[in-house]
DNA sequence: CAGTGGTCTAGACCACTGA
DNA sequence: CAGTGGTCTAGACCACTGA
């Protein structure tokens, strides 16, 4: 009864079990009461209980099996929520000035036989956009981007004075799927020169491919100065699905 | 009617709208039919429609506002699902042999005044576990770990012959929250020596802090040889909540 | 075969909020 | 104030699966 009364009943039930699980009061493998039992405890209908427990099952906190019952799930290791930062916003948040500086922008045919480029271009050509993300006038990240000209016809008239290409694309070509690969590389001489550091400096390399439905939109390779940048991933057992 | 009949109705409704959204047939900002309208189309009760659309709202594909209606959401940029790899499993998947090689294992008091260590140790001491992840006898990753002795008393008797410390901890001390920080660093001379490479080589640095409820469990810093390793993050608009 | 969760109905009252 | 989604009920039938 110390619970805020504004909360819907199904959320209160969900939250109650969630807390008992997170506190370790209910350990992995433990059996939860049946829906019938929970109904009686909360004095509500079965649908309300089902809604609460289904949410926990979707979130991966519990496993439900017919006849057997409901059990606290083993924690899953393999997925975390990764915050993908908006570079411009993040730079400004730190109180620095942000700027995008273009290195190259041109349209060209896809390389012959190169699967990756051909896949991206479809039956059209490629738009190549390379540039630097600057923080307080200093290079923070160098970015090499390829965009399918067919998929994004409006790009020809795009101006990156206000928004860098990534932000522009997000605003104009909503994507549905993306794949990001993260690794560490040493900057090549050319890359280091653009970044204003010595060749061989360690960089965080982010490669991202983006789709809209089945259609490939863009491929980008970003090299961040390793010390100046990092990414944070958080995990609460699929909390994102709950709140 | 070409739909597999085995699918529950609410999932079919959800899937129908999901596909129309992902295909771009319904664009961000577009309004979906009201629950009343969907009821009539599918010839079902409102609860069934509500279950389908609520799932899409939870997944972030649609926004629902009273009186105004239901709308296709703008794609969110800021969260992706990061696959956190189980190093041992991943090495074996590549057909290589996996081994964990201990470098150091000892119990010591927390450093004085060091907030991070003190926080982790609580009122107890720290267990320090450093080691190498080996693939086919070659070092792939060096790992520096601190564990709260209070939080994990069973660790004293743990044997890492079969499972490396990370896997052991996961099996024995289910965590509820973790925070991962990813960056690129150059290996120090000492680190490079353990890894069997030249000093200054670029490494992917993964730092993770793990909680169980409010209690800190472990802190780990892993240095992967950048070329030998990468991480993949995928995004479908919170698909994880759906499937 | 009996207990459990999965699904669905046909209603109801309400809070919110845009017209 | 009227339309919309949020929540909840008191039932029902069913599929699954462990005893």
Image (cartoon, coloured by chain):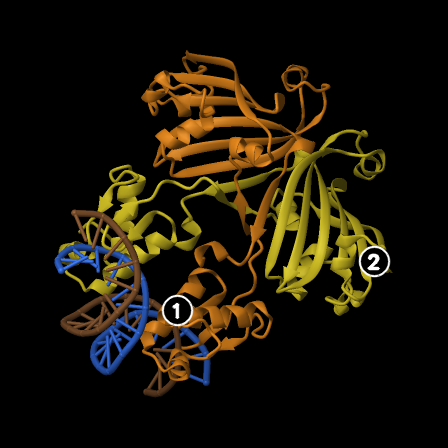
Chain colours: A yellow, B orange, C blue, D brown
Q: Measuring 42% from the left and 48% from the top, which residue is drawn there?
A: A238
Cα distance, mark 1 to mark 2? 44 Å
The residue mark sitting in front, 1 or 2, is 1
Q: Which mark is residue A106?
A: none
Q: Measuring 17% from the left and 62% from the top, which residue is drawn there?
A: A44
The chain to which mark 2 is attached is A
Would you say A215 lies left or right of B206 here? Answer: right
Q: Position of residue A52 (x, y in %)?
A: 29, 57
Residue A8 drawn above or below residue B27 = above
Q: Position of residue B151 (x, y in %)?
A: 34, 25
Q: Position of residue A181 (x, y in %)?
A: 64, 44
Res. A160 visible in picture: no
Residue A80 drawn above or below residue B65 = above
Would you say A198 lies left or right of A17 here? Answer: right
Res. B196 visible in picture: yes
Q: Which quarter of the figure has residue B57?
A: bottom left
Q: Would you name the residue on which mark 1 appears? A: B6
Q: Measuring 38% from the left and 40% from the top, which residue is drawn there?
A: A75
Residue B230 drawn above or below residue B36 = above
Q: Would you name the residue on which mark 2 appears? A: A110
Q: Position of residue A100 (x, y in %)?
A: 76, 50
**Quarter that holds the C terminus of chain A:** bottom left
Residues behind callouts 1 and 2 on a single chain:
no
Q: Which quarter of the figure has residue B119?
A: top left
Camera-nearest residue between A195 and A57: A57
Q: Measuring 40% from the left and 45% from the top, which residue is drawn there?
A: A237
Camera-nearest residue between A243 and B225: B225
Camera-nearest residue between A2 and B5: B5
Would you say A183 lies left or right of A188 here? Answer: left
């Amino acid at each position: 009864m110390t619970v805020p009364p504004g909360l819907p009943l199904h959320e209160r039930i969900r939250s109650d079990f969630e807390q008992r699980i997170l506190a370790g009061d209910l350990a992995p493998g433990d059996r939860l009461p049946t829906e019938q039992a929970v109904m009686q405890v909360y004095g509500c209908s079965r649908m309300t209980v089902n809604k609460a427990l289904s949410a926990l099952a979707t979130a991966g906190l519990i496993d439900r099996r017919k006849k057997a019952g409901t059990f606290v799930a083993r924690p899953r290791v393999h997925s975390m929520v990764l915050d993908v930062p908006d570079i411009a916003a993040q730079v400004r948040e730190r109180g620095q000035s942000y700027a995008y500086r273009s290195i190259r922008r041109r349209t060209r045919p896809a390389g012959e036989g190169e699967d990756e480029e051909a896949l991206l271009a479809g039956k059209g050509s490629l738009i190549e956009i390379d540039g630097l993300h600057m923080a307080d006038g200093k290079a923070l990240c160098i970015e090499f981007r390829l965009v399918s000209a067919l998929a994004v016809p409006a790009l020809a008239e795009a101006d990156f004075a206000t928004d860098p290409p990534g932000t522009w694309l997000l605003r104009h070509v909503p994507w549905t799927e993306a794949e990001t690969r993260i690794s560490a590389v040493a900057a090549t001489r050319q890359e280091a020169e653009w970044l204003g550091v010595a060749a061989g400096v360690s960089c965080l390399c982010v490669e991202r491919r983006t789709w809209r439905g089945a259609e490939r939109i863009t491929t980008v390779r970003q090299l961040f100065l390793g010390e100046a940048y990092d990414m944070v991933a958080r995990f609460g057992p699929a909390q994102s699905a709950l709140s």
